[in-house]
Image (tube, rainbow, N blue to C red):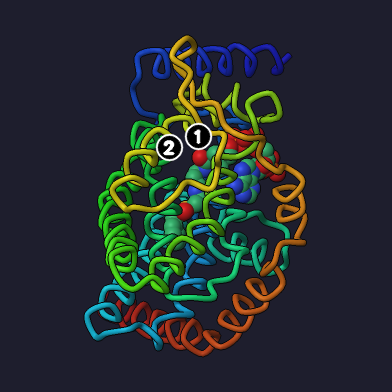
Amino acid sequence: MSAPVIAVEDSEEQAHFDALIDADLRIEPRDWMPEAYRKTLIRQISQHAHSEIIGMQPEANWITRAPSLKRKAILIAKVQDEAGHGLYLYSAAQTLGITREEMTDQLIEGRARYSSIFNYHTPTWADMGAIGWLVDGAAICNQVPLCRASYGPYGRAMVRICKEESFHQRQGFEILLELSNGTPEQKQMAQDAVNRWYWPSLMMFGPTDDASPNSARSMAWKIKRFSNDDLRQRFVGMCVPQFEALGLECPDKNLRFDEETGQWLMSEIDWSEFDAVLDGRGPANTERLKRRREAHENGAWVREAAAAYAAKQSAKDRIAA
Ligand code: FAQ
């Protein structure tokens, strides 16, 4: 006889949850939420956190080789920011009932996704410019709407992250601008890096809307506010005048604005490349995970020391109490 009572409670809880979403109010950790909503958030937020952490690697590769002290200091600050973003996001995910250890295990055991974009190499200094301009630019386009995500801790983490991403994007733009106004070789290096990163940055927005299984539900729950294709369109529109300001060419020679539909018409994205990267067969997938595993193993003593210190402190507190 108890089943119908639970069902009534659940439906009341569901109605309350739906009302909060309809009114554009926030869901907080203490609130009841449908299990599927919780799981979707854990999936997206943990993938996002992993992306920030793995995303430190392509740029960290250039810290020791930055062309000046100023550039080195900026790059160190940026890579540290990405670590901070990962930590805010892991903390937001933890409010949903998953532990940091579980998420870390999922990543280092290869069971979790992280953004496709971080599986590409950074062979020249200009790649630092292209990552800042295009990758952080795409991240901002995707993440500004996430500041209004219906789940409170995620939306609030995104506000701070977006502020930092905009500094990242500007420093990337400025690296490219300097190279583009430099020697012909420097300008070519900038163009080559942009050619390498342009298409992968468009893939960051995820599959096309008709191939995106999660979008409809995430949008109904107001986690995502815009579809993958809409955000990709917005990003391309942002890049066009910036290509001009940089004096660089867009690698998509077919790109044009269609006045009738108000859409950017672009060449077909090579989705087989995206699928391969998601399947672990991108240029740098293996080394990214290997490096992450090594870092985790090398950090074991820090975690052990922190746990021992915490145990000592709580023993002291117990004695004092
Ligand atoms: N890479 O149904 P959808 C950054 C997966 S942070 C890998 O459309 P959804 C800062 C997707 O997970 C960059 N996997 O999925 C930085 C799903 O798989 P699943 C990270 C991808 O969630 C800069 C499947 O495909 N940003 O750049 C990708 O509705 C510089 C079907 O896709 C975020 O995570 C991809 N590109 O939409 C750091 C933002 N795209 O889980 C360092 C938050 C899709 O069903 C240096 N996340 N997949 O097995 C989001 O906005 C969304 O999760 C999307 C995907 C838009 C990424």
Q: Is mark 1 on a helix, strand or loop?
A: helix
Where 38 falls versus 14 (above or below)? below
Please tell me how crowded label 1 is: few (under 14), some (14-19), or many (20+) other residues with Cα within 10 Å: many
Quadrant for ligand 1? Answer: top right
Give the residue displayed 38% in from the left and 38% down from the top.
240
Which residue type does callout 1 highlight? Arg
Q: Which residue bears the numbered disc 2? A: 235
Which residue type does callout 2 highlight? Phe
Q: Nearer the viewer, residue 30 or 172?
A: 172
Residue farthest along the left direction in this orientation: 70
Q: Which residue bears the numbered disc 1? A: 232
Residue 321 seen in the figure: yes
Q: Quadrant of residue 317?
A: bottom left
Residue 148 placement, left or right of 223: left
Where 186 falls versus 24 (above or below)? below
Q: In which quarter of the image is residue 153?
A: top left
| Cα distance in 3D space between marks 2 and 1 | 5 Å
Location of the C terminus (image quadrant): bottom left
